[in-house]
Image: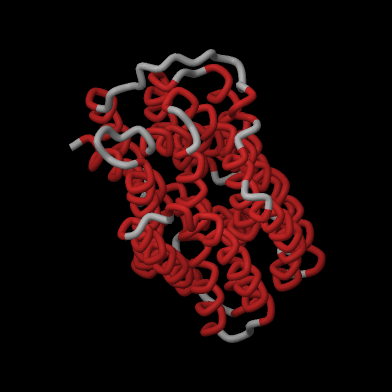
Amino acid sequence: MPFAALLLATAFFRSTQNAVQTTIGPFGHILLKLSPTIVGFSITLAGAVGALANLWLARRLQSVRLRRMALVGLVGTSFAIVVAVAGSSLPTYLISAVIFGAAGGLVMTVLATLAGQVPGVAKGRSISAYTVALSASLALGPFAESLILRVSGGSLKVAILAFLPLPLAGAALIAFVVSQVKPSTETEKEGSFPAHIRDNPHLRQAIVALLLYQIPFVAITSFGALIAHFSYGASASLAQLSFSVFFAVSLGARSLLVWKPPGPRGGLLLRVAAFVTLTGIVVLGFGHSYIWLLVAMAILGVPHGLVFPVSLSLVAKSSSSADLAKANAVLFATTSGASVVTPLVFGVVATYLGYRVMSLLTLIPVVVLTVILLRLDMSKA
């Protein structure tokens, strides 16, 4: 079944991407002895390349060609792992970041677009199912990585290499989806962003909501293992278990959305998610024992589970099939800006002020974006 193949490919890719994202910090800082500033720069580099990949897709590719790009991105993800592990040096660390960023930028846009074009399945339900596949892989991935770290004696190289085959398996599944999923018969003009896409109020609301959560999420995925180690004294294995708690809660929230899609309650759910995000950041910044780390991760898992599917649903419902690929690419390219700037800033802050201060500083942009989101909601965007 094409949709099942799409969901499996999504799970394989996202679990691998998350394994790299959560391990790249300790890999660079602990194994390669790089400063948090350099680690943050490498993550910023990956985010910048990913944003450029999204923009390139948005301006030059029609929907029928996007699936071809997923194959390139999935193979590229595995290749990035090979470069990072085989090189184990600053140059290869940065090169792998570039490859990884480009691959992720291609794949995420394609998968989100395909999920919104499933024949015979309502957009809200298919997108929610797609995000459940994301969360399931994210909940199981860190748990599997934690076990691998235990068995391998804490080897970060072995932990990353264990995920290398998954994107290749995903590429094989996407090839099946390419031959089965019917492309849209609607036409679109390449190289342009029509005004009705740029001015879509639901797209603007989705962008603000994703930016609001992307900032703390980047901090967690990029530096979460280091926060757990330096702020809470957790081992690499226990840090991965905290990620499992985070993504397990997210999976629960997204599963509820599959059972009962958000519908007209989307705006309210985004506002609730914003305030829960603020609460989670406060707990993460002020907590001291490992149990408080788990509590913070559980709280932050709630908005992670809500924001992405609700935002994608808003965009899908307000976009035609011909416009959806461009709208999604604009959405991902814009929100990727958080991945470009945030890691470098957080890396510098962590270097000079520590990881606890870095965690609390995420409150500033989240508060600002919450105010913007509330105003958009009040204007019935």
Q: Is residue 151 left or right of residue 250?
A: left
Place of residue 10 in the rendered image (x, y in percent of width and height, measured from the top left): 35, 43
Place of residue 2 in the rendered image (x, y in percent of width and height, measured from the top left): 22, 35
Q: What residue is drawn where x is 53% and y is 63%? A: 303
Furthest toward the right, the residue is 352
Vertical comparison of 152 with 42: above or below = below
Q: What residue is drawn where x is 54% and y is 32%? A: 327
Q: Nearer the viewer, residue 141 or 96?
A: 141
Q: What residue is drawn where x is 27% and y is 27%? A: 181
Place of residue 250 in the rendered image (x, y in percent of width and height, measured from the top left): 43, 64
State which quadrant residue 42 falls in.
top right
Vertical comparison of 34 with 123: above or below = below
Tell me if I can see residue 306 in this picture: yes
Place of residue 43 in the rendered image (x, y in percent of width and height, measured from the top left): 63, 47
Q: What residue is drawn where x is 38% and y is 19%? A: 64
Vertical comparison of 40 with 121: above or below = below
Q: Nearer the viewer, residue 73 or 276?
A: 276
State which quadrant residue 175 falls in.
top left
Q: Nearer the viewer, residue 143 or 82?
A: 143
Furthest toward the left, the residue is 1
Tell me if I can see residue 153 in this picture: no
Quadrant for the N terminus in the image = top left
